[in-house]
Amino acid sequence: MNVRYAMNRRKAVAVVAVASVALLVVGCGAEEKAKADKPAATKPAPQQSATTEGSQPVEEPTETLAVLKGQDGFEVAINSAVRDAGGFLTLKGTLKNTSSKGRSVPDALRGDETEVLKHGTSLGGATLLDGAGKKRYYVLRDTDGRPLTTTGLGIVSAGKSIPVFMQFPAPPASTTEVSFQLPTFEPATLKLS
């Protein structure tokens, strides 16, 4: 009985080894092909995590496109809205706690989509509304459902700001104005160039 068990075990180990090598070869080929097919300019912005407790002051950019006021003294200032050749629109700005005490970033900012909820507090609930084109654009997600936006938001100290970003599909070039919406914040109009 032990001989039969040992032979079956060896066969199982051999099958696992062959399958592992096959998956490694297929995975490497797919990764190389993906790198070759995807030009560097079309890569989405990297995930950005926020370190919020005791954050350093953020340098204020020279231009502010919009300031949205939210609950509990939070403000979001949008400083840039840049289209890239890959068909993305990236918004960058700051999230500031204007109150006199440290506050947790509201969970509502991540929205209510199941895939986004799994990845913690983020700005995944942000949307752009193209009134003229009658379309709504949601924050992009990666293949694991993580939003392409600042993640890992926690407590923001009193008077401190943290840098944030959000990446959307770019509206058509003919769209020059969108409404930016973030849960618990008042909407704001953004001019696109």
Image (cartoon, rainbow, N blue to C red):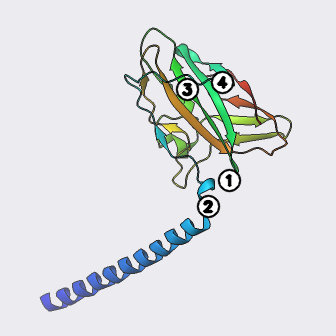
Q: Which residue lies at the image location 71% right of the left edge and 41% below the top edge?
A: 137
| CB under 8 Å between discs 2 and 3 | no
Q: Name above or below for residue 4 compared with residue 95.
A: below
**Disc marking residue 63:** 4
Q: Which residue lies at the image location 44% right of the left edge and 33% below the top edge?
A: 50
Q: Name above or below for residue 191 compared with residue 18.
A: above
Q: Gap in Å between the C-alphas at discs 3 and 1?
A: 24 Å
Mark sitting earlier along the chain (2/3): 2
| CB under 8 Å between discs 2 and 1 | yes
**Disc marking residue 86:** 1
Q: Gap in Å between the C-alphas at discs 4 and 1?
A: 24 Å
| 68 to the left or right of 120 | right
Q: Position of residue 32 (x, y in %)?
A: 51, 71
**Can I make out residue 71 in this image?**
yes
| CB under 8 Å between discs 3 and 1 | no
Q: Circle 3 sits in a helix, a strand or a loop, which is it?
A: strand
Q: Gap in Å between the C-alphas at discs 2 and 3?
A: 29 Å
Q: Circle 4 sits in a helix, a strand or a loop, which is it?
A: loop
Q: Quarter of the image for the C terminus: give it.
A: top right
Q: Position of residue 77 (x, y in %)?
A: 61, 23
